Image (cartoon, helix red, strand yellow):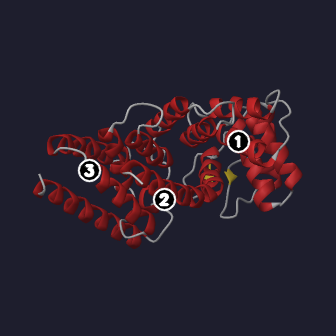
Amino acid sequence: MNELEAFDEYFGILYFSRMYCVYCGLLVLSALLLASAVCGCSAGKSVAQSSDRNGPICLNAGLELTTVQVDLLKRKVKAGDGEAAYTLYLYFGCCVNDEAAADSWLRRAAELKHPQAQLIIADLIKKHKHSLSGFGANAPAAVRNLLEQSAQTEGSACHELASAYAEGYFGAPNQPMARAYLHRGADLHNRMCWMELSRYYHLGIGGPRDDAEAYYWIGLETRCTDPGSFSGQQTWLAREEIASHLSLPVLESLWNRIDDFIEQVNAQKVVVNFSPFLSGMIDPKLEAEGRRCSQQREDEHRRKCKSKR
């Protein structure tokens, strides 16, 4: 087994194990955040003022809604509000446990171009043979239509499109197209796309090999995860392997790029999907410890690179 084959096997195991864990949380975590955004509130504070005479819409900890709030959201849907339809999908699916009603509101949200709803419907059609009525002539056409629209703003949709092109879901496997969508998703700050794009660049999949770009994208990921976690350890191993192919001047230039981006993230000028160090979802002390360990590992990595060159 040569170097690239070994790296591909290792990175493939790492990537798919991480993708499974992350994707399982995608619908729940993203849904909760988007639902609170419908009401203009932050996660954890579920109250927002509405211009409607009926007063505020409140999404409490369980996404509960009053009858008045449900009626208000239904009126918003009639006016073409996709986010209102998506909130009703969450309510009927998570609180009322009415699968038929939830599905109806999810489909309506997708019809109204809600990107997260489009992503979910595409996944249901592709993997679970969900009804594609109104979305395309056949399953591949419906999936592509939905994901291409969602991918305008959703990095996760870019990742799903890349996977579909790579596996040949739309016809013959198309690695260049997969790479293009991974790049789009990476530019939309999707961490799954960062990981897979790094692999594509390092192995020359869908285009020329570029270890500098491979290092940059995996470098961003290592700055967003605790190096002591299982995924953090494996990601750091991959980053250090890529670094071994780069000169110090190139590495120093890439470190500046990485630092500039992370500075924007820390200043909350850039939103990363998923939140670095599970910010807002775990004990702040654990998050702070993860950040401290990450910076420590970063400093050690750079000292090691300098001492070897």
Which residue lies under the disc numbered 3?
243
As drawn, the label of residue 117 is 1
- Name the amino acid type tagged 1: Ala
- First of labels 2, 1 by sequence position: 2
Q: Position of residue 297 (x, y in %)?
A: 26, 64
Q: Residue 166's x, y, as percent?
A: 59, 38
Q: Is residue 183 above or below residue 50?
A: above
Residue 136: quarter of image? top right
Relative horizontal placement of residue 129, taking residue 286 as reference (left or right): right
User: At label 2, which amino acid type do we have?
Assistant: Leu
Of residues 34 and 251, the one nearer the viewer is 251
Badge 1 marks a residue whose secondary structure is helix
Mark 3 or 1, closer to the camera: 3
**Residue 137 found in image quarter:** top right
Give the residue pinned by disc 2. 14
How far across and down, in percent of the image, does residue 92 sit?
A: 81, 54
Q: Position of residue 12 (x, y in %)?
A: 50, 54
Q: Name the residue rendered at 59%, 34% in the picture.
A: 151
Res 216 label:
none
> 5 or 193: which is nearer to us?
5
- Could you classify mark 1 by the number of other residues whose Cα lies within 10 Å: few (under 14), some (14-19), or many (20 or more)? many
